[in-house]
């Protein structure tokens, strides 16, 4: 394995392996079959270090050595170079069938096997047909819970990811001028950390006139629209290392001070952010976070994104909206935060009547005494390109 790649220590991987093995025993599972593609790759990456780009399975037996299966064939050499586990193979012409062959090789033809990830339906049909005596158990949420509390090494990587993300935000502020396109903003953002080895996360951006807003949440797709004096830029940026990214949200005004309406929305968002951060500590509950966020609704505004979510090697629990916008899968009020959990607090406050909105937020870690923001870029409504 190359020493020029970022890697966790063997001690860190032994910690993860033990967590996984203990969890398999506690849940009477003979193995895990973890599926990933571009979506859901963190489920595989946490145990192997390998970032999936195509259909990938990680077979993790309770009583034998794990196997990483990846597509396409030409991806196998890179997977072997990257992976923290030694047994890395091509997934074969049919990944589902290869999974069954590996399970049979490991002697797993009955008992319970936990499934993690959004398996293709045709693969699941093969698993259930070829191994009819195996009970296939949905295990994704419980498996992801192993990642909630971060180790010392993980926190160090998150700090580096936060630094890359701060650099991205600084580059966005510097590049934002009348006449610059959204595509050019993205180029500036990515250039801020790429040469240093930073990994792309997200660059969600919306640009719209403050006096006639047509967007209130950062967009996932950028356009050739040119910035104009009087625009607002709504942003959500992430860059990182090895899957451990920072996350930052800031509104920017182009050429002019924010309008009174946008200034008010910003003040509500910052107040909500600060109220939420004030309650974050070990033992704090989801109910306390939601109580703090009630302030948004009291100002006759609402949100169009998660208010808070777990973070660090993926999008994790708890995922919260306000009480007024919550969905049925929101965690119960007694869900408790723990020391060394990483969370993003990100109120995306908007006014449904005017269509104006913006987002503020940071990546934080829960400490013994409260919450520490890993993002150090100033929390401000900056004016750019004046």
Image: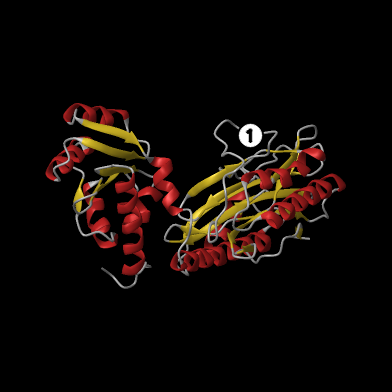
Residue 31 sits in which quadrant? top left
Residue 36: x, y in percent? Answer: 35, 44
The answer to whether residue 302 is seen in the rendering is yes
| Image coords of residue 170 (percent x, y) | 64, 64
Q: Quadrant of the C terminus?
A: bottom right
Of residue 47 and residue 337, the one placed in the foreground of this image is 337
The image shows residue 76 at horizontal and vertical percentages of: 23, 53
Give the answer, above or below, for where 260 lies relative to 165: above
Quadrant in which residue 96 is drawn: top left
Horizontally, residue 183 falls left or right of residue 66, namely: right
Quadrant of the snapshot with the N terminus: bottom left
Above or below for 219 versus 195: above
Seen at 43% across and 41% down, the residue is 141
Please name whichever residue, 107 or 36, is drawn nearer the observer in this view of the structure: 107
The picture places residue 265, in percent across and down from the top left corner, at 79, 46
Task: State the colouring used for the structure image.
Answer: secondary structure
Q: Which residue is mark 1?
A: 326
């Amino acid at each position: 394995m190359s020493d020029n790649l970022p890697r966790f220590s063997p001690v860190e991987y032994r910690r993860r392996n033990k967590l996984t093995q203990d969890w398999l025993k506690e849940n009477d599972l003979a193995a895990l079959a973890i599926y990933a593609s571009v979506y859901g790759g963190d489920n595989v990456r946490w145990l192997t270090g390998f970032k999936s780009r195509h259909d990938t399975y990680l077979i993790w037996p309770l009583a034998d050595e794990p196997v990483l299966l990846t597509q396409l064939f030409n991806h196998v050499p890179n997977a072997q170079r990257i992976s923290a586990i030694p047994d890395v193979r091509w997934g074969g012409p049919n990944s589902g069938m290869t999974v069954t062959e590996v399970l049979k090789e490991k002697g797993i033809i009955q008992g319970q096997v936990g499934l993690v990830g959004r398996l293709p339906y045709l693969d699941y049909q093969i698993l259930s047909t070829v191994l009819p005596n195996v009970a296939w158990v949905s295990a994704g949420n419980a498996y992801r819970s192993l990642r909630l509390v971060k180790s010392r090494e993980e926190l160090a990587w998150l700090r580096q990811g936060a630094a890359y993300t701060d650099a991205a935000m600084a580059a966005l502020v510097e590049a934002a001028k009348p006449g610059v396109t959204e595509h050019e903003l993205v180029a500036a953002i990515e250039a801020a950390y790429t040469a240093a080895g930073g990994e792309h996360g997200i660059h969600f951006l919306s640009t719209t006139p403050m006096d006639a807003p047509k967007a209130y949440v950062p967009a996932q797709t950028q356009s050739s629209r040119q910035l104009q004096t009087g625009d607002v830029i709504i942003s959500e940026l992430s860059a990182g290392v090895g899957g451990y990214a920072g996350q930052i949200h800031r509104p920017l005004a182009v050429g002019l001070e924010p309008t009174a309406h946008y200034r008010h929305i910003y003040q509500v968002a910052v107040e909500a952010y600060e109220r939420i951060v004030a309650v974050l500590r070990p033992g704090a509950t989801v109910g306390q976070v939601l109580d703090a966020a009630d302030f948004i609704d009291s100002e006759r505004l609402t949100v169009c994104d998660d208010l808070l979510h777990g973070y660090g090697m993926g999008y994790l629990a708890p995922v919260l909206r306000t009480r007024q916008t919550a969905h049925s899968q929101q965690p119960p009020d007694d869900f408790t935060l723990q020391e060394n959990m990483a969370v993003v607090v990100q109120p995306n406050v908007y006014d449904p009547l005017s269509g104006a909105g913006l987002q503020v937020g940071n990546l934080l870690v829960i400490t013994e005494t409260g919450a520490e923001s890993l993002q150090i870029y100033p929390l401000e409504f900056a004016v750019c390109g004046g």
